[in-house]
């Protein structure tokens, strides 16, 4: 549980949309105010069918903002100011409808306008029927919002007001308070502020001709998660990504490339940097003299593809020199004697750390969500338990921050 002391003096703008869970938002206001948070509320038209403006006003001890077109509200507090004079916007309950309007960038009522006009972080607590939550439209809207940096708490599994069971129940007020405290704690923990980082991620595509290419199965999940985790700790991150199906992580500058040579050029452009993490699965070989015309079946049998070696980005960035990042981290995807191979790879490539993982068939690492890694440094090996790739990323980012501590 996050330490709630951090909440004192913070300003939250609470958007209450129209769902049965709106009654829990009254409790949320009380719990936040007990901890010294100033809560100002925006109530949607539908929200006002579930809780009365008077209750919200009494609990916040402030005006309840409801109408985009209210002259009184606009003259007291314009909607732009409303959206900026807060440290965090919390949407609870966040209905399917409001999430859709947020994802679509609509500004058709005060709540949506405030959420569109804000330059502050937003935390949503979704609440809806299980089928509405599981609908592809809602899932796509939520994923889009999260890729833009919107934070989420819940929904929880449970029996719903409609008597169905499953995910869709709004997080409990104290869980939302915890998430808010967690957000402020994370925001004040930025040990990598002022540091620049380059992260490579995903596969590379090496053309054979204009329509065909050589590639590999890397999903980019681990590299993208590392970029996001370094950014969360305050680093200014350039993510150089091969083709993936992932959204660009929030808070990073993303350079999209296809080939290994383009990846190297983008990394060199991003220098100088303090940190480089090479998590991409770069194709070792490219086709020598890729055809600029589509190769045709001309009756003469299959064409011979001559391969030539790609530049090694990790080894290039690790080379001693004026622009060498202070900390260069490589990955080693191995099968068999993982530690021996990875330790040798660290020496061969000249990097400072190697994150080694076992990608033998059956481990599910490639393309999967979990990873089991060993962190190999000059002074030894740390073996981490199997955990989600996001958690590996957070732990690695903390290790990077530890390296720079006091430097
Ligand atoms: N790497 C890179 N550029 C390349 C090849 C690899 O930057 N052209 C980086 C990867 O991003 C990773 C590390 O090097 O951080 C490990 O690469 P890997 O392909 O596993 O090792 P190899 O050198 O290819 O060795 P081997 O194939 O013998 O295991």
Image (cartoon, rainbow, N blue to C red):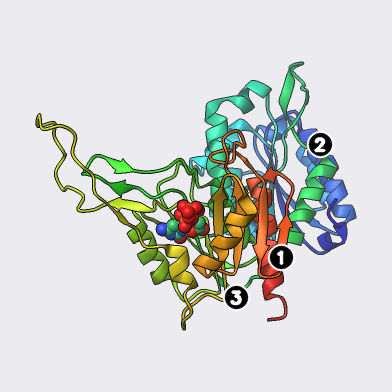
| Callout 3 touching callout 1 (CB < 8 Å) | no
Circle 1: element type: strand
Q: Is residue 367 left or right of residue 386?
A: left
Q: Is mark 1 within 8 Å of ligand 1?
A: no
Q: Identify the mark nearer the N-term, 3 or 1.
A: 3
Which residue occupies the extreme right position in the image? Answer: 34
Q: Residue at x 73, y 54 (%)?
A: 383
Which residue occupies the extreme top position in the image? Answer: 163
Q: Disc 3 versus disc 1: distance between alpha carbons?
A: 28 Å
Circle 3: element type: loop
Provide the residue designation for mark 3: 194
Provide the residue designation for mark 1: 380
Mark 3 crowdedness (10 Å alpha carbons): few <14, some 14-19, many ≥20: few
Which quadrant would residue 395 be assigned to in this image? bottom right
Q: Is residue 101 left or right of residue 63?
A: left
Q: Disc 2 versus disc 1: distance between alpha carbons?
A: 50 Å
Provide the residue designation for mark 2: 24
Q: Nearer the viewer, residue 206 or 100?
A: 206
Mark 2 crowdedness (10 Å alpha carbons): few <14, some 14-19, many ≥20: some
């Amino acid at each position: 549980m996050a330490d709630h002391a951090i909440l004192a003096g913070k300003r939250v703008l609470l958007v209450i949309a129209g769902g049965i869970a709106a009654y829990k938002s009254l409790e949320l206001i009380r719990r936040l105010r007990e901890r010294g948070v100033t809560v100002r509320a925006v109530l949607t038209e539908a929200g006002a069918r579930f809780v009365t403006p008077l209750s919200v006003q009494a609990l916040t001890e402030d005006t309840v903002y409801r109408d985009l077109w209210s002259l009184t509200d606009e003259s007291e507090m314009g909607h732009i100011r409303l959206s900026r004079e807060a440290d965090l916007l919390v949407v609870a309950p966040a209905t399917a409808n409001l999430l859709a309007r947020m994802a679509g960038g609509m500004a058709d009522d005060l709540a949506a306008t405030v959420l569109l006009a804000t330059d502050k972080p937003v935390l949503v607590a979704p609440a809806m029927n299980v089928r509405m939550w599981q609908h592809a439209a809602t899932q796509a809207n939520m994923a889009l919002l999260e890729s833009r940096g919107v934070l989420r708490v819940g929904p929880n599994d449970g029996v719903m007001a409609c008597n169905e069971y499953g995910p869709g129940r709004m997080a409990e007020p104290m869980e939302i308070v915890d998430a808010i405290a967690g957000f402020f704690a994370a925001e004040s923990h930025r040990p990598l502020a002022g540091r620049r980082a380059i992260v490579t991620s995903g596969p590379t595509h090496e053309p054979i001709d204009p329509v065909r290419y050589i590639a590999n199965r890397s999903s980019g999940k681990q590299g993208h998660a590392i970029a996001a985790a370094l950014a969360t700790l305050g680093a200014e991150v350039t993510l150089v990504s091969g083709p993936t199906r992932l959204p660009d992580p929030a808070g990073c500058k993303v350079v999209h490339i296809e080939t290994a040579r383009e990846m190297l050029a983008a990394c060199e452009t991003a220098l100088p940097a303090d940190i480089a993490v090479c998590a991409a699965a770069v194709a070792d070989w490219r086709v020598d003299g890729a055809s600029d015309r589509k190769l045709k079946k001309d009756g003469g049998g299959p064409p011979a593809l001559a391969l030539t070696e790609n530049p090694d980005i990790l080894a290039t960035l690790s080379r001693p020199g004026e622009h060498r990042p202070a900390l260069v981290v490589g990955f080693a995807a191995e099968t068999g004697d993982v530690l021996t191979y990875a330790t040798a790879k660290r020496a061969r490539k000249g990097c400072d750390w190697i994150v080694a993982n076992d990608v033998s068939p059956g481990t599910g690492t490639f393309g999967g969500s979990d990873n089991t890694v060993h962190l190999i440094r000059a002074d030894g090996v740390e073996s981490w338990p199997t955990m989600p790739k996001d958690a590996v990323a957070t732990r690695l980012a903390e290790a990077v921050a530890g390296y720079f501590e006091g430097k």
